[in-house]
Image: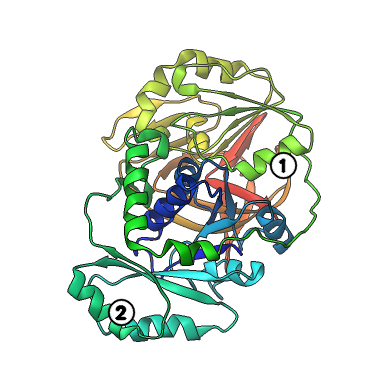
Amino acid sequence: MSFVIAAPSSGSGKTTFTLGLLRALTRRDLPVRAAKSGPDYIDPRFHEAACGQPCLNLDAWAMPPDRIIARSAGPLPLIIEGAMGLFDGAPPDGKGATADLARLLNIPVVLVIDAGKMAGSVAPLAQGFIQHDPSVHIAGVVLNNVGSARHEKMLRRALAGTPILGAIPRTHTLSQPSRHLGLVQAQERPDLDAYLEAAADLIVAHCDMGALQTLLKPLSTQSTRSTPPPPAQTIAIAQDAAFAFSYPHLLQDWHSAGASISVFSPLADEAAPAAELIYLPGGYPELYAGTLASNVNFLNALRQSKAQIYGECGGYMVLGDSLTDKDGTAHQMAGLLPLDTSFQRRKLHLGYRDLCAHQGPFCGAWKGHEFHYASTLRAAGEPLFQAKDAEGTTLPPMGLIQNNVSGSFAHIIDLA
């Protein structure tokens, strides 16, 4: 049986526990796979580094049940890291919560509780989660941020009768640098392997590895799902530190459907390989705006291309006329869309999106997600997507399309 790692709220220590456990099991020659609940791009790359296996995105809001079941099944046990709190999902009814995955896959939950500022109060908190929904089975709790041996005794006494799978002491050596609402990307951490080893040492020393290992059996559920047609038969994808946010499951779909995929690096001033579609995914182009603006080989190749060109979030901004960085410096971009964006005044745009396009490489209805801090200074021309939020409220049209170039701030997750 595989399991879900969840918590009462964000910031409880799920990611550190997950990474340490993945590396600890891998060191014991117990191969496991990892998955992340929701549309997160960053945590999955850390999971892959920890266990040496591709990490899945499993999104119970954007993906239909057969997609989730088909992607979860496999010969190796699966450990899923939740997002936010266990029962936190999209409005109005919480769809897409981590609990939805536990129900759908019929797997137990390991609940990580930040106990740093509580003692006896941990009991009603834990019992409230255990009893809240009988269809979500919580196999045990992991106490995180424990202050001392005396503190641990108090917590264990309060939780008498509740399976305790670990008590992790407070430590400041495993804090991770963050950017916006996520971690700094895995490929930007030269100390990543040392960090993962230290996290694994902590988990082995303070968790019941035997009890955790008893939860590890491959998922037996099976499902078949037809692969949607790719947006083109030959696809060139930008891939480097500025353009790192492409969903592996979409790339796998395209490859399975017969598309030929190649990659190139705009930061290395590489021109896109010959292809029917050039795809610039999201990432952090604002951190490299000066470099991208000076990479004339990359930009001129886009300007001269007759292929379909599609930009998503960060890639969308690079297709515009200008991108202003946080210091207020405007950098000239590709100039293929009448668009000016800025990070000088950050404003969070966040939420699931129902999308529909009538032209461009992604015609049809899609489930997507918007997450960025950029402001749009100017967007002129024909919009690409009609959009609604998770509650069905109609939003202003998203993105732009002009000739062979299109894009938007939305990250496409799956067919609607």
Residue 393: image location, x then y, percent: 58, 66
In the image, 14: left or right of 103?
left
The label shown at residue 322 is none
Q: Give the colour scheme of this rendering.
A: rainbow
Q: Earlier in the sequence, mark 2 or mark 1?
A: 2
Q: Amino acid at mark 1?
A: Asp
Front residue of 34 and 312: 34
The quadrant where residue 304 appears: top right
In the image, 185: left or right of 225?
left
Residue drawn at point x = 68 percent, y = 20 percent = 306
> In the rendered image, which quarter contains the C terminus?
bottom right
The quadrant where residue 264 appears: top right
- Mark yes or no: residue 38 visible: no
Task: For label 2, count other residues whose C-alpha is less than 10 Å away and answer few (under 14), some (14-19) or many (20+).
Answer: many
Above or below — where is 395 with respect to 377?
Answer: below
Residue carrying label 2: 156
Residue 230: image location, x then y, percent: 75, 38
Residue carrying label 1: 253
In 3D space, how far apart are the residues under numbered discs 2 and 1 (Cα atoms)? 47 Å
- Mark yes or no: residue 276 visible: yes
Residue drawn at point x = 20 percent, y = 70 percent = 149
Front residue of 55 and 296: 55
Residue 311: image location, x then y, percent: 57, 35
Question: At numbered mark 2, what does the secondary structure look like: helix, strand or loop?
Answer: helix
> In the rendered image, which quarter contains the N terminus?
bottom right
Above or below — where is 353 with respect to 306?
Answer: below
Residue drawn at point x = 73 percent, y = 62 percent = 221
Q: Nearer the viewer, mark 2 or mark 1?
A: 2
Q: Amino acid at mark 2?
A: Arg
Residue 170: image location, x then y, percent: 23, 61
Question: At numbered mark 1, what does the secondary structure look like: helix, strand or loop?
Answer: helix
